[in-house]
Image (cartoon, rainbow, N blue to C red):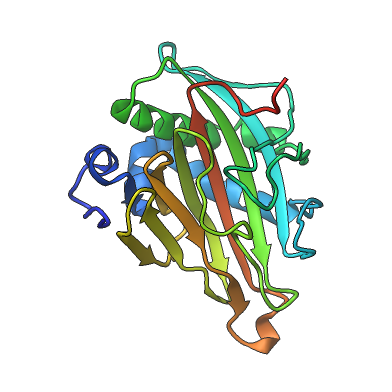
Amino acid sequence: MFLNTPEQSPVDALSHVGCALLAAPQVTQRLGEAAAGLEALRESWSRLPRDQHLRDGGAYRFRRHSCFTQDLATGSLTLVPHRAHWQPIDYNALHGGLERWFEPIEPTIASSAAWTRLVKTLGELFAQVRPAPCWYVEAHQFRIDTAEGIGRPTPEGAHRDGVDYVAVILVNRGDVRGGETRVFEAQGTAGVRFTMQEPWTALLLDDARVIHETTPIQPVTAAAAGSGVRDTLVLTYRSDGFQAPPT
């Protein structure tokens, strides 16, 4: 497995190895004029409520969650009524089987031009790899902090999400060390390791072909414990409806 070069099409990389990395300039270029609104989104990460569902007893994660449908034929992106986030235990051994209700993404953020263009652009890219009439999109705003000394971006460990595609977008990173991203073949041993540093860098994953995780973060110094954060936006795209408990 290897990371694509800037010259390689992310569609080709996803098709051949199941992952692609878009540098921040590549992301903003794809968004066109809407990219000017990205920085206005960033401040909303400072208003995320604490995640009340962490089963490891930690208090290092803050989160919002909302769901959308993307009609690939019409190009529309529609916010759906607020719903719980649910994953089977097979995909999340730590939190699987729980209906987890999080506060929704702020309406002014979810309806902004930059947000809409970002979600739609990535969905259109994924549809070039695997055509679908509609994507069922779950959006997660995450903040991991180091106030307790250590923060875990993926407390469930290396995992898949039970969807078609995943986009992990770095929004902010400050006063931390660690946070190495690791992507491995789901049916093999090859993998890559790297650290996302520049805001709006995007990692794109074919969830059926790879597993992924991010290592814990720590403050760069003891004095920075209260200010160390890693903010990400995670978008998942699934063609077969939203994941939900068996009926």
In the image, what residue occupies the spot 34% across and 54% down? 23
Task: Look at the image and tell me in which quarter the C terminus lies.
Answer: top right
Given residues 80 and 57, the one toward you in this image is 57
Q: Position of residue 59 (x, y in %)?
A: 78, 64
Q: Quarter holding the N terminus?
A: bottom left
- At 61% from the left and 77% from the top, the residue drawn is 218
**Residue at far top of view:** 74
Q: Position of residue 213 (x, y in %)?
A: 50, 58
Where residue 48 appears, x then y in whole percent? Answer: 74, 51
Residue extending farthest bottom: 222
Q: Residue at x 68, y 67 (%)?
A: 145
Place residue 219 in its image quadrant. bottom right
Q: Is residue 119 visible?
A: yes
Depth check: give the residue in front, 207 or 76: 207
Residue placed at 64% from the left, 50% from the top?
Answer: 93
Q: Is residue 85 above or below residue 188?
A: above
